Image: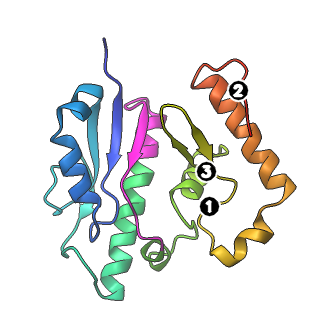
Amino acid sequence: MTLPTLAVTLGDPRGIGPEIVRAALATPEVMGAARCIVVGPTGTGVAVEESVGEWHGRPGPSTPELAATAGKLAALAIERAVELVRTGAVQGIVTAPIDKSALAEAGYADPGHTEMLERLTGHPTAMMLASETLRVVLATTHLALRDVPQAVTQAALVRAAKLTRDGLRDWFGIAEPRLA
């Protein structure tokens, strides 16, 4: 059996992302399921195969300048991971947590991974939470709770339902998905 190759981004170098990636890559379950190519900055304590720069800070709170640098490095890792998919070098992407405010400090208008991946790929995206028996696709993402009622529109629900139906058919092989 050939294992899939996945690009694994480190996320915000100040946050828990590098620690999560390091721990995950040390487990037989992860290493037995895929070949992982780590994408991100050097200097986080995690071996990186695809470097997007060097991190000179440390984990935890930082100055606005370091936040902007962290946001830029996290965004560059996502951009590089998408490029690796485009070239066929990897079959998928796993992303570690990013700091949305640091992304904004770095000049990115994307409020999170989901929207950034949609912009970079030019394809509609949705966030799915999945277990063995249940898959949940969000109709809204990365909004203040007070903004959710206005964002839950008929168009948003139809878009999420169509993406979910198509994804369950195409990626999960469910011929007639049941949506609720």
**Is residue 93 covered in magenta?**
yes
Q: Secondary structure at mark 2?
A: loop
Please give left or right for residue 21 compared with residue 162 in the image: left
Image quadrant containing the N terminus: top left
Q: How many marks?
A: 3
Q: From which residue to which does the magenta span run? A: 81-100
Give the residue at mark 1: 141
Q: Position of residue 122 (x, y in %)?
A: 64, 46
* Amino acid type assigned to the residue bearing label 1 in the image: Thr
Separation (CA) of disc 3 from disc 1: 13 Å
Disc 2: which residue:
177
- Tell which tag, 2 or 1, sits nearer the viewer: 2
Dot placed on the residue nearer the N-terminal end, 3 or 1: 3
User: Which dot marks residue 118?
Assistant: 3
Q: Give, as a three-letter code, the residue at label 3.
A: Glu
Where is residue 161 drawn, in percent x and y? 75, 41
Amino acid type indicated by mark 2: Pro
Left or right of residue 116: residue 52: left
- Pick out the residue farthest to the top: 1
Q: Would you place residue 64 above or below residue 43 in this image?
A: below
Instruction: Work out whether residue 49 or residue 112 is closer to the camera in this orientation and state it.
Output: 112
Along the horizontal axis of the image, is 88 left or right of 58?
right
Q: Is residue 41 above or below residue 39?
A: below
